[in-house]
């Protein structure tokens, strides 16, 4: 389990590794074990989802994964959606959702009636939620990327100036990283808000000077059309400036994708998402994934439904028994 989802080792390689030490375990059996484990862990993942959606600020992102089409030998593009807490939240958690497409309905189904602030890119699939109860928080890193690419392509002085100005906003974030939400908001209003206004005014002026359809116009338009969402973080100290935290949580899927190549079915994709949710959340809380899963899978069958949240990564207490000279010592580790 950990070898596949934490170390990105495909089951066919694990089959060969076991074979070299004299253990004939077919990959079909390994796959069955993975599926059964995913079923056992699902109630815990459901509880983790509920805890994440209790947060008023959540990051969201999605990435493609190839999935074997039912009854066919070829694959088609499915998607993994990631929803995680912010760096400013006491809760450290991520939940993955596997879906057969990138249709916005999948995000809406996951988020349900949640009415918080969603940090995301400009993907249209989230728009329906913004028209109802959610608040859109733009990603300044995406806006910066447009100017970074423009400068890399032709050493644009305009892009260089934009990068310098956006860099000033990020400098304020570095200064306020360890502050309380209230103090962070106050410093942002004092230092970042004037910088943002000056940047916006400058962009409007520059936009009138460049031709429509040019690369420079496109870079400016990206920010100008999304300016309200891009600068909402200035009004709330609990809101981050960009969506980079969730993109870091997407990275394990990119690594896995290059090794195990595709999901065998929608069901196996959902099982993988469930297991990865717990493994990555355990890592976010400083736990060893193997120790966490081993302990949780041992205790889960006997855990009361009303107390299942005690096994969530951010609340996990591992009880390890060491027997020495006939005495049992219990060491307890806990993360909050």
Image (cartoon, rainbow, N blue to C red):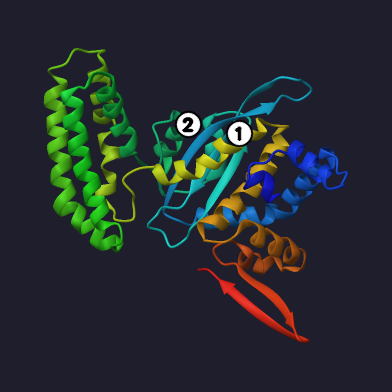
Which residue, given by chain and number where applicable, does mark 2 sit on?
125
Please give the name of the residue rendered at 66% of the width and 68% of the height, measured from the top-left corner: 306
Number of residue marks = 2
Residue 134 image point, x, y percent? 41, 44
Q: To which quarter of the image does residue 124 belong?
A: top left
Q: Few, some or many C-alpha atoms within 10 Å of disc 2 (few <14, some 14-19, many ≥20)? A: some
Please give the name of the residue rendered at 48% of the width and 58% of the height, measured from the top-left corner: 92
Please give the name of the residue rendered at 68% of the width and 58% of the height, measured from the top-left corner: 293
> Closer to the observer: label 1 or label 2?
1
**Circles 1 and 2: CB atoms closer than 8 Å:** no
> Can residue 50 be seen from the camera position used here?
no
Which of the numbered marks, if any, corresponds to residue 257?
1
Q: Secondary structure at mark 2?
A: helix
Residue 318 image point, x, y percent? 64, 70
The residue at the far front in this view is 20
Pick the front one: 94 or 252: 252
Of the numbered discs 1 and 2, the one sitting upstream in the chain is 2
Q: Secondary structure at mark 1?
A: helix
Which of the numbered marks, if any, corresponds to residue 77?
none
Pick the front one: 111 or 158: 158
Gap in angstroms between the C-alphas marked 1 and 2: 23 Å
Residue 321's place in the image compared with 296, above or below, is below
Q: To which quarter of the image does residue 230 belong?
A: top left
Q: Few, some or many C-alpha atoms within 10 Å of disc 1 (few <14, some 14-19, many ≥20)? A: some
Residue 53 image point, x, y percent? 50, 53
């Amino acid at each position: 389990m950990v070898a596949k989802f934490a170390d990105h080792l495909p089951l066919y390689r694990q089959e060969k590794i076991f074979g070299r030490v004299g253990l004939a375990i077919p990959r079909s059996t390994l796959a069955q074990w993975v599926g059964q484990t995913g079923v056992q862990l699902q109630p815990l993942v459901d509880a983790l989802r509920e805890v994440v959606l209790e947060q008023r600020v959540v990051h969201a992102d999605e990435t493609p994964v190839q999935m074997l089409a039912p009854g066919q030998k070829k694959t088609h593009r499915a998607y993994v959606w990631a929803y995680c807490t912010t760096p400013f939240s006491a809760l450290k958690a991520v939940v993955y959702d596997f879906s057969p497409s990138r249709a916005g309905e999948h995000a809406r189904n996951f988020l349900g009636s949640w009415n918080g602030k969603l940090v995301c890119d400009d993907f249209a699939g989230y728009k329906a939620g913004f028209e109802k109860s959610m608040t859109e928080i733009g990603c300044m890193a995406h806006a910066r990327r447009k100017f970074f690419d423009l400068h890399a392509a032709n050493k644009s002085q305009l892009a260089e100036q934009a990068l310098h100005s956006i860099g000033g906003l990020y400098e304020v974030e570095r200064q306020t990283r360890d502050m309380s939400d209230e103090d962070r908001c106050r410093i942002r209003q004092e230092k970042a808000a004037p910088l943002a206004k000056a940047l916006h005014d400058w962009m409007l002026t520059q936009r009138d000077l460049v031709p429509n359809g040019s690369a420079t116009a496109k870079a400016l338009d990206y920010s100008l059309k999304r300016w309200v969402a891009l600068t909402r973080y200035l009004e709330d100290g609990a809101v981050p400036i960009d969506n980079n935290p969730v993109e870091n949580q997407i990275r394990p899927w990119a690594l896995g994708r290059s090794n195990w190549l595709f999901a065998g079915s929608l069901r196996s994709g959902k099982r993988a998402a469930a297991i990865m949710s717990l493994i990555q959340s355990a890592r976010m809380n400083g736990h060893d994934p193997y120790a966490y899963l081993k302990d949780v899978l041992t205790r889960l069958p006997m855990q009361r439904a009303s107390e299942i949240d005690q096994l969530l990564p951010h609340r996990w207490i591992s009880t390890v028994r060491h027997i020495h000279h006939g005495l049992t010592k219990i060491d307890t580790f806990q993360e909050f």
